Structures are given as structure tokens and as C-alpha cells.
Amino acid sequence: MIGAWSAGKLQEKSSSILHLRYTLDKPVIAIMLYPHTNHPMSDISDDIYSEAHRMVGRDEKQQQLNQQGGVFWFYGLSGSGKSTLAIALQHKLHQAGHTVQVLDGDTIRTGLNKDLGFTDEDRQENIRRIAEVAKLFANAGIITLVSFITPKRALRSAARKIVGNDDFHEIYVRASFEECERRDVKGLYAKANAGGVKHFTGKDSGFEEPESAELIIDTEGAPLNQSLATLSDYVTPHISKQAKP
């Protein structure tokens, strides 16, 4: 029954990086020292050895799961219905036998991204991290539903670039600021109006509507069941095992 809308971080105290590499025959320990203050990660990329070629491939995983992995990126104002839709879709797909992971902004900020705030710089890092995580899930053949405000077009473009265009589906969950404020499911709008939330999207921090998106769902103009049906009609063909050659 559907209801109504409602790389581990390196310790900073260390001044260098210990790089360990192992071969199949015996462990090889390579110690390379880099001052934290002047080495971008790109400087050590030549010293990273991917093991992806020895792992079970994506096609084999998808064959076993009998589905096509992908990233469906829900974005919109707080209270627009992103997570409600994503979770409703997860339940529907799960009941149909699919393996689905929801990556919700609030949940992620209690763990992986709990060190980040809501400045433009922190929002950029927030999206970068979750896009990399979503990419890992998609490459494992898992249907990945990401629910993040993602207020700027540049952030959405950056997420698409990380995930890959073929796997990235941009879903704008649209509702006006006034309607989201009326719903105020989490009490954030009242708190923001009282000055208790800084950089609040739509009030102190801007939200850019999409110039293009794979799907736009207007939750202000349609009930949840209708919105879920529209969403399901879009997603289903993209997750079938025959979706890609």
C-alpha cells in the first residue's frame, strides 16, 4: 500500500602515504613518500594498479541477476518527493524480483558524507562521492536509485560524467518551493524560515531547473500512484536484461 506524499580518508596527522601492492606470487611493498600538502591524487595515479581485469565482469553479474544495472538520479527541492518515489519504486522492483539499492541524501550524510556541509564546495564533493559509489553499484549490475537535491546543472553534469552517459538517467522530481514549503515533511522549511538552516536550497541557495532531463515527474500535479506508474514505465525497459547488447 503506497501512502500519500509526505578511499577511506587518509589520516591527516600522517605526512606521507604508504603504498602497498601485491602480486599473485608474493607481496611487493612499495613505499613512496608524498607530502600531503602538495600532491594532488592525480600525481600518484601512475602508481595505482587496477585489478578490475581479474574480477568477475559486469555482464556475468547482470546475467546472474537477470537485470541491467544503471543509475536513476532523482533530484529536486527538499520535499518534492524524490525519496518517496525512489523508495516506492524500490519496493515495486524488489517485489518483481530485482536487486535494487537506494542511495538517499540524508542517509548518506549520516555516514559516508557526514563530514560535509552545504556550501557549494561541499555540495560538489557530496555529489562526486555518491556518483562514484553509484557507478560501483551499476557496474555490479544493481539498479541504483539516487535521491539527492543536486541543485546545480554543473553538479548533475559532473555526476553524469562520472557514472557514464549510458548508465545515467536524470529524473527531475518537480514541485514548487511554495508546495514543498506547504508539505514541509521534515520541518526544514520552518527551521530555515526561523534562520536555523544555512544555505537552504530554494531560499538562500539557488536551484537550477534542467535544460533537459530523461524524465520529469511533476508531483505537484499528480498523486503518488500516478507518478510511480510514470516512473515505472520509464525505468522498466532500461533494466531488462535485453536493454543493451
Image: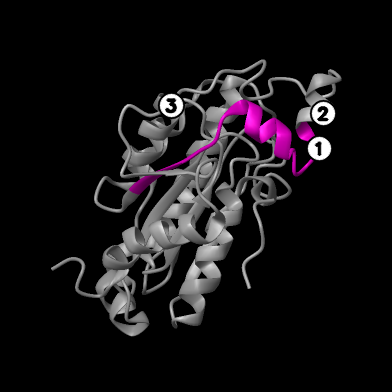
Residue identifier under label 1? 187
Q: Secondary structure at mark 1?
A: loop
Answer whether labels 1 and 2 touch (C-beta < 8 Å). yes
Query: In screen coordinates, is 105 left or right of 72?
Result: right
Looking at the image, can residue 167 be seen?
yes
Q: Is residue 173 magenta?
A: yes
Report how far apart the C-alphas of labels 1 and 2 lie in the structure: 6 Å
- Residue extending furthest toward the top: 204
Q: Give, as a single range, the part of the protein colored magenta.
A: 169-188
Q: Is residue 102 magenta?
A: no
* Residue visible at 33% across and 67% down in the picture: 236
**Up/down of 67 relative to 149, above or below:** below
Q: Amino acid at mark 2?
A: Ala
Residue identifier under label 3? 209
How crowded pointer 3 is (Cα within 10 Å; few <14, some 14-19, many 20+) is rated as some
Rendered image coloring scheme: one colour
Which comes sooner in the sequence, label 1 or label 3? 1
Report how far apart the C-alphas of labels 1 and 3 lie in the structure: 23 Å
Q: Amino acid at mark 1?
A: Gly
Q: Secondary structure at mark 2?
A: helix
Is residue 3 or residue 232 the one in the foreground? 3
Is residue 66 or residue 50 the one in the foreground? 66
